[in-house]
Amino acid sequence: MTDDPGPARPPLTKGTGMHIATIRESTMKTEQERDWSPLTDEQFESYEQNGYLHLKGLFTPEEVQRGLAVIDEVVGQGAPTIENHASFTDRSHTVRVRDAVTRTAGMDYFLDHPKLVGPLMTLLTNSVQILGTEIFVRSLQDEALEYWHTDGGEYLQRVRLAHGSPSLQIKAQIFFTDVTRSDSGNFLLVPGSHRRVPTDQTALCYIEELDEPLRRGELPGEAVEVKAAPGDVLLFPYSLWHAVAPNKTQERKTFILRYGHLWHRPHDYLQQPAEVLERMSPRLRRMFGDFGPKVHPTDYYKPVDQGDVMAVGGNHGGE
């Protein structure tokens, strides 16, 4: 006697009578020629092991000037800094323009840039949503601009992913001013800390075991002081232990971009206004969670056209 399952039943999908697997091998696949390249295996493994990736010279000097013009324009218009929140420390030394993409179309170029999209597509396995766009201008201060902490609150601080798992949420910092010298508002980090939970856990996610020494100007022996040139980009997950060094040189101007999966809740907006989306490429609209007027709730989890939509943006190869 044999186990006969009987006639195979054709897998069905709504409206077509066909299972998605009969249409394409994966929703990430596309026959279009992509304008972006994924991270190399070596880059991916470095990010996995260390919890960050310093992409040097990602943007050209001309693109750096373009970014500086965007920052100066928005700040010059008197765009308000991010509203105060109980979790914030002193912000008098920093201008933070939240949801900056609604204040300038100039940010679109960087958000849709193939050289930035490619690494994010790798780390988030093609499910890329822009959760927040901020312009940061750090002024001078003799003390640390930010003490040791993790991002995303205590809920994300306690999440630890297995090696090789896709990231949950990522921040990209684009540097437009020179931070190659110490005491320039340098980003500080502890390699590998994205897989560790601090000994002291607090509601604001500050890491007192490292903060007290930082008040004396001391860094952990394992810490890295990121020395970034204009055009460099730093990628790191929310769980990475990081801080910001004193700034004794010049104003430090950066973009802070937050990313997650399409099914994540955005950070600084609920839905982008129609007039903002209308100026964007289909890829950039998708990265802001826009699926058009006939979105199905399941699209955020199973976007069947994701590979096609994310293949090419509006920057024509970033040129």
Image (cartoon, grey):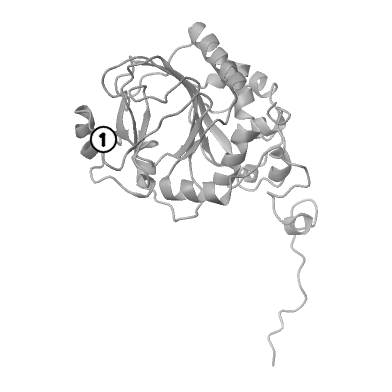
Q: Position of residue 73 (x, y in %)?
A: 55, 9
> As rendered, which of 309 and 302 lies closer to the eye?
309
What's the residue type where badge 1 is placed? Leu
The residue located at (74%, 42%) in the rendering is 308
Q: Position of residue 236 (x, y in %)?
A: 45, 39
Q: Quadrant of residue 237?
A: top left
Q: Is residue 233 visible?
A: yes
**168 or 53: nearer the viewer:** 53
Name the foreground residue: 71 vs 199.
71
Image coords of residue 142 (percent x, y):
27, 18
Q: Residue at x 42, y 39 (%)?
A: 238
- For residue 30, side relative to residue 123 (left or right): right
Question: Which of the image's four quarters has the N terminus?
Answer: bottom right
For residue 316, above or below residue 253: below
Q: Which element carries disc 1, helix, strand or loop?
A: loop
Report the residue at 56% width, 51% height from top: 41
Res. 82 image quadrant: top left
**How many badges with numbers are in the image?**
1
Residue 103 visible in image:
no
| Crowd around label 1: few <14 · some 14–19 · many ≥20 (10 Å) | some
Q: Mark 1 highlights which residue? A: 219
In the drawing, does residue 187 fall left or right of residue 164?
Answer: left
Image: 23 above or below 259: below
Q: Residue furthest top?
A: 77
Residue 229 at x, y percent in the picture: 48, 26
Q: Is residue 306 above or below residue 13?
A: above
